[in-house]
Amino acid sequence: MASSLPSPATHTLPGWRDPAPLLAAALEHWRASQQALWIFGYASLLWKREFDAMEMREAGVAGWHRAFRMRSRVNRGSVDCPGLVFALMAGGSCVGRVYRVRAGSERDVLQALWEREMPTGVYDPRWLSCRTPQGRVQALAFTLPHRHPSHTGRLSDAALLEIFQRARGRYGSTLEYLAQTATQLERMGIRDAEVQRLMRLAEQLETNPTHADPQAR
């Protein structure tokens, strides 16, 4: 899993905070719970998990929803052309999956997740009560507060199309990320009206590929 970061250093980015104390706090909370480590996935963790899961269950959380409103200046965009990724934000509900991490690998799994998801310390890691068919579990989830500088708020369709056209980071483009998430949600039978709307919007690029190209205006 790549951990190299682009220039400038991540600590110069808006809203940056040191991810190390956040990781230490997550590890401490898990150890104190004396429970298995569960991770809640709602976007890329549904289709690119990158760690062994001894068990996986469909899961829902109340009071949080999947929102395509977080700027990505490393993974799916750059400093010059920020992309977008999903975040778990307050309000509504969300259906995804929980994964039970193999005993003995918890520290390594969290370290790798931090390198992937938290290079700028953008998320607020939270332990959420997740409803599953086999009962509730407490799982670690990556959430974003509305007040964070990386929260975009509602973007216009024109702004979204330009991001779809241009934004690319160390793991690929924003559009690829959105499409892979949409495909996985469909495979799981999870209907997310906003994700479907975004995919319909992205289809405009196939019929008019210069739609978001500033040089074509």
Image (tube, rainbow, N blue to C red):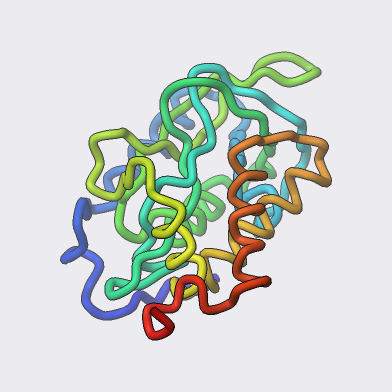
Name the quadrant containing residue 48. bottom right
When the figure is inspected, residue 174 is found, relative to residue 199, above or below; the finding is below
Residue at 62% in and 64% down: 204
Q: Nearer the viewer, residue 149 or 25?
A: 149
Which residue extends farthest left? 12
Say if residue 75 shows up in the picture: no
When the figure is inspected, residue 155 is found, relative to residue 176, above or below; the finding is above
When the figure is inspected, residue 196 is found, relative to residue 117, above or below; the finding is above
Q: Nearer the viewer, residue 80 or 10?
A: 80
Quadrant position of the N terminus in the picture: bottom right
Q: Picture coordinates of residue 199 (x, y %)?
A: 64, 53
Q: Picture coordinates of residue 180 (x, y %)?
A: 68, 59
Name the quadrant containing residue 84. bottom left
Q: Picture coordinates of residue 125 (x, y %)?
A: 40, 37
Which residue extends farthest bottom? 215
Say if residue 64 shows up in the picture: yes
Residue at 60% in and 73% down: 208
Residue at 38% in and 42% down: 154
Which residue extends farthest top? 135
Relative placement, left or right, of 156 versus 210 is left
Quadrant position of the C terminus in the picture: bottom left
